Amino acid sequence: MPEGTLTSDLVLYLETDDYSGPLDRETRKELVRKLKRLEEAEAELRALREKARRLEEENRRLRSSPLLLAATDRTAEAGGIPSSGTFYRRPRPAGHRRRSGGQPGHRGHGRKRPTPNAPSVRVTLDRCPDCYGRLDEPCDAFRRTITDLPLPQLLVFELEVLRYWCRRCHRRVHAEPPVPPNQQFGPVLAAWIAHQRILGLSVEKVRTSLSESFGLSISEASILALEAWVAERLGPEYARLRAGVKEASSVGADETRFRIDGKNGWLWVYEHLAATVYQIAPTRGKAAVLEVLEGYEGTLGHDAWDPYDAITTADHALDPVHVNRWLERAEVRHRVEPRRLLSTDPAKLTSAGHPPTELLRFVDGVRSIYREAILVVKDRPEVSRRERRRAYRRATRRMRALLRVAWKDPDAARVAKELRHRRGMLFTFLRTPGVPYHNNGAENAIRQGVLIRKVSGGRRTWAGARVLERLLTIYRTCRKQGVSFRDRMLSVLMGSGPPLPSARPQS
């Protein structure tokens, strides 16, 4: 018989004229038809098995893809998707209702009643709105304090610069005018443009706002020139804040992609108690870190990115929230719903199947150790050194025992290897007072740059990148210090020059 499958070989044997078996011709024909249907069913079964295999591979790939992980903020965070890439509120537990108004334990944020600085506006009525009868004198009144904007009005004035003859130098001299060079626009307009730009408005939107709100016609080149002038005047302030990073006792660092001239660049942030400093560099390597932090001797908090290890003089602190992201990604790949760092909820599978016992034992162990250590300092401003030392010894001993296990699960083994490599920086927040257990300050600061990147796509030139890092640094530092960014810019731009006139009549 010819070579082939058993079914096809049997069909060929029954159809041949040399058949000498006990079956008659009709029985053989019926048997051949059944065998052929069986052969077609076998081929269809093979095709379905191959299709199921391909779908299983595609499902495994999509389970950790950005498209699926961005469905909720929890799975997005677990998969490494920035929180700004999701637009969903965190789900609340069943039956939980958040009461309106201020929450327990939080300081109130009600708006303070302003003091009036303009004449009162009196609302009168001559006739009754119902019967249209004439009304006498008012019997009483009620009052409200209204806050409104003044009508937009441009301030146009002549700038006269007096020049003097110096008998010693034998030349004419004059004071530096408080306006941009070779421009017909003043410092208040320049500060307004810089403020709008740092809030994320494009040049075209700034130009449209000036045209529709104030009736001012200005070119895009003038807007960019005014923004660059503000950044240039803020240069010494930026240099002072950047140098002050090395003087801080604790610094949180983070980085994100930021395209310059269509090529990859990186936006770095260094956040401490007094300031937030931004740096835009062409590299994500250690050269950018050394440029700002070389010789730093305080505590550096980060997310385990290797270039931070170049600062050998600092005491490093690994962000536990970032460690939890490693655990969440492993849970997502194993069909487990990701959990928070301090959560005590049991694991919940997202699909049917056997639970990953070994991985769950590892992630629950890491979270348990971190949870016990964090609760020692969380919401407790004063913790004795003795309690810190005791908690530090216990946490390091438990973590050492957990990492000593030979984990067979690939994800557990990979995370355990990274934690062993960085075991000296896992519990720095217990060892060093004043060091936060998280890196939320730098994480929140880097989002400002992410928002600008999403709106504008980056900057077209490196000169524009230098403008952005200066303005962003001064803006975020002013917010941290509780001062007005606009007032800070005007104090630098105008200096000790003559005050600008007012468009309103003087009272």
Image (spheres, helix red, strand yellow):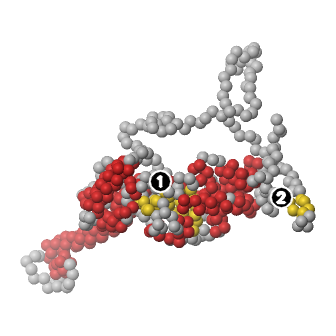
Amino acid bearing label 1: Asn
Question: How many marks are shown on the rendered structure?
Answer: 2
Quarter of the image that includes the N terminus: bottom left
Most foreground residue, 116 or 52:
116
Check residue 175 in the rendering and tell me which mark sits there, or answer none. 2
Amino acid bearing label 2: Ala
Q: Where in the figure is residue 343, as x and y percent of width and height? A: 35, 49
* Residue at image coords 42%, 58%: 319
Left or right of 403? Residue 482 is right
Q: Where in the figure is residue 230, as x and y percent of width and height? A: 71, 58
Residue 19 visible in the snapshot: yes
* Residue at image coords 19%, 72%: 35
Q: Where in the figure is residue 236, as x and y percent of width and height? A: 67, 61
Quarter of the image that includes the C terminus: top right
Check residue 92 in the rendering and tell me which mark sits there, or answer none. none
* Residue at image coords 41%, 60%: 318
Residue labelled with disc 1: 440
